């Protein structure tokens, strides 16, 4: 592809005469530049890409795209208003705009995205569509599961377009993907033509990045406003947005949506709703109120909050795409659990052990409420932390939520990154005390996550629910700038095996584990 062909995606002026090199790819990482690639100098991350232009040219970049008024010695320099948006559009153009060959469904929201995406994916497959999926747990392309990277939900633009191109090239017809606020704000989905979009909820999260709740909400709204300008597709008769009528964002998102709106609600009137919701340790039962008639549902998902995720998925598939209602309901009933989302860990113990991804105040509240329903008169013991270099207000809120809904809370590490773990735990302890928590009685601090899980499991009695929150499916934990191997599920099995005196996996070791050994 010639540079002139590639940058036509930017609606950019023509290049100077004689400067139209052959292009071999697009990247924003100067370390990945090879001869013939276009280097896009992005701003707003840990480093300013413009500082690496000379390195990119030296490595063989055929052209440079950036925001600053400058030159790139010896190669064309294309100046744009937003280099991150340019990266998304150029990546889409390089791969032939693959989303235009797929029915593309985006799911955004603070909590519940992964479960909702998984539900939609299973419904599509049950309905006979060849579908792919991109989300927190990974990407699924034609039966192959791919890791999308550490702590990443929406991949960067080149990787995302590569996944979509692989789906289209494999003959898939549909793709459902999680769309985060970071992915929207950083233009990772620029060049993606969405046909259907759904929101789970918009609550307190990522304010360290977005600044205010209003900005966070406006970024989410971009997924819905963009439905009106997406390229037309033969396979899509009418685009639709699925909105949560129970969420405070409903009226605002509706005002920003230029296409058909389908609503869902667990509490009131909507196109899709539910009643008679019943919870158990084995799953969720309810009566679905669908547009044509009521249908019973029994499924493997736990917690009343999953009724919202189910309704969102059904609204997309039935209300938006016209899939047969019974087919969709049967797919939900047959769907297994989602990795790291209320995942039971069984080693023969007399109490329940669970790993869940809940990492926001809202999701933690829902998860602990579900644990309370299951525990009955027994206790709920919660283990969780709060990430470093992220929303600081959330730390106090998370700890306060633990005090309110759990009988015993163990505060511990969760990706402290370059922050002091001790300082993070002190902020959380202050939040616990503000809600009446008493350290050493109903809340405890244990910096080592393995030690925290061990303490919780050793404290459990028959019938209790021990739940580790915040890491879920993730396979690493970040201390400083290093990702250390870590899996809450493996760690939970390891400490359960210790208590039971049974064979089990080794407990993963973290930098905090050394201090634990010294204590013992």
Image (tube, rainbow, N blue to C red):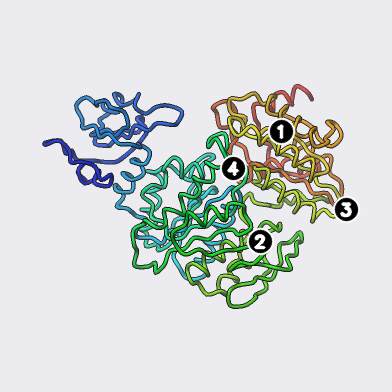
Helix, strand or loop for disc 3: loop
Up/down of 260 relative to 419, above or below? below
Depth check: give the residue in front, 8 or 411. 8
Residue 413 x/y as whole percent = 68, 32
Q: Which residue is mark 4?
A: 474
Tell me what residue is drawn at x 55 percent, y 42 percent. Answer: 214
Depth check: give the residue in front, 60 or 426. 426
Depth check: give the residue in front, 64 or 503. 64
Left or right of residue 466, residue 104 in this image:
left
Please tell me which of labels 4 and 1 falls first in the chain: 1
Helix, strand or loop for disc 2: helix
Up/down of 289 relative to 493, above or below? below
Helix, strand or loop for disc 4: loop
Task: Give the mark toward the camera: 2 or 4.
Answer: 2
Left or right of residue 138, residue 383 in this image:
right
Q: Are marks 4 and 1 in contact (CB under 8 Å)?
A: no
Q: Which residue is mark 3?
A: 377
Up/down of 470 relative to 172, above or below? above
Q: Which residue is mark 2?
A: 307
Query: Dot 3: within a 10 Å radius of its alpha carbon, few (fewer than 14), some, or many (20 or more) residues?
Result: few
Tell me what residue is drawn at x 38 percent, y 55 percent. Answer: 193
In the orientation shown, which residue stands out farthest toward the left?
17
């Amino acid at each position: 592809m010639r540079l002139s062909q590639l940058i036509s995606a930017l609606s950019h002026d023509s290049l100077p005469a004689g400067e139209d090199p052959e292009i071999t790819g697009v990247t924003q990482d100067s370390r990945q530049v090879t001869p013939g690639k276009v280097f896009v100098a992005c701003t707003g991350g840990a480093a300013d890409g413009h500082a690496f232009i000379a390195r990119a040219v030296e490595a063989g970049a055929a052209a440079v795209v950036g925001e600053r008024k400058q030159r790139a010695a010896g190669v064309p320099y294309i100046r744009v208003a937003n280099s991150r948006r340019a990266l998304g559009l150029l990546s889409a153009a390089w791969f032939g705009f693959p989303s235009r060959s797929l029915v593309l469904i985006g799911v955004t929201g603070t909590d519940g995205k992964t479960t909702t995406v998984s539900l939609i994916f299973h419904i599509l497959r049950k309905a006979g569509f060849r579908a792919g999926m991109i989300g927190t747990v990974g990407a699924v392309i034609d039966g192959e599961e791919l890791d999308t990277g550490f702590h990443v939900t929406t991949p960067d633009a080149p990787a995302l377009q590569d996944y979509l191109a692989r789906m289209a090239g494999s003959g898939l017809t549909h793709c459902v993907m999680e769309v985060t606020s970071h992915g929207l704000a950083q233009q990772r989905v620029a060049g993606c033509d969405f046909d259907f979009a759904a929101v789970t909820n918009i609550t307190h999260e990522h304010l360290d990045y977005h600044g205010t709740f209003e900005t966070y909400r406006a970024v989410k709204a971009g997924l819905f406003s963009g439905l009106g300008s997406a390229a037309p597709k033969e396979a899509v008769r009418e685009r639709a947005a699925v909105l949560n009528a129970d969420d405070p964002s409903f009226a605002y998102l509706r005002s920003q949506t230029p296409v058909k709106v389908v609503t869902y609600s667990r509490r009131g009137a909507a196109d899709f709703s539910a009643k008679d919701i019943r919870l158990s340790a084995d799953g969720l039962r309810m009566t679905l109120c669908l547009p044509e008639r009521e249908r019973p549902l029994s499924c493997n998902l736990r917690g009343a909050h999953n009724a919202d995720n189910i309704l969102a998925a059904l609204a997309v598939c039935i209300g938006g795409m016209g899939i047969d209602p019974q087919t969709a309901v049967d797919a939900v009933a047959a769907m297994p659990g989602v990795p790291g989302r209320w995942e039971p860990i069984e080693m023969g113990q007399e109490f329940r052990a669970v790993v869940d991804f809940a990492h926001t105040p809202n999701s933690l509240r829902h998860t602990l409420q579900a644990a309370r329903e299951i525990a009955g008169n027994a206790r709920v013991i919660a283990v969780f932390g709060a990430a470093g270099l992220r929303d600081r207000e959330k730390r106090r809120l998370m700890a306060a939520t633990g005090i309110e809904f759990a009988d015993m809370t163990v505060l511990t590490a969760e990706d402290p990154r370059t922050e002091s773990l001790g300082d993070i735990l002190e902020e959380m302890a202050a939040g616990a005390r503000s809600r009446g928590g008493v350290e050493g009685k109903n809340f405890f601090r244990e910096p080592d996550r393995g030690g925290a899980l061990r303490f919780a499991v050793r404290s459990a009695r028959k019938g209790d629910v021990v739940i580790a929150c915040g890491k879920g499916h993730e396979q690493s934990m970040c201390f400083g700038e290093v990702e250390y191997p870590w899996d809450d599920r493996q760690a939970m099995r390891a400490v359960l095996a210790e208590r039971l005196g049974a064979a089990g996996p080794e407990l993963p070791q973290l930098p905090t584990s050394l201090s634990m050994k010294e204590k013992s």
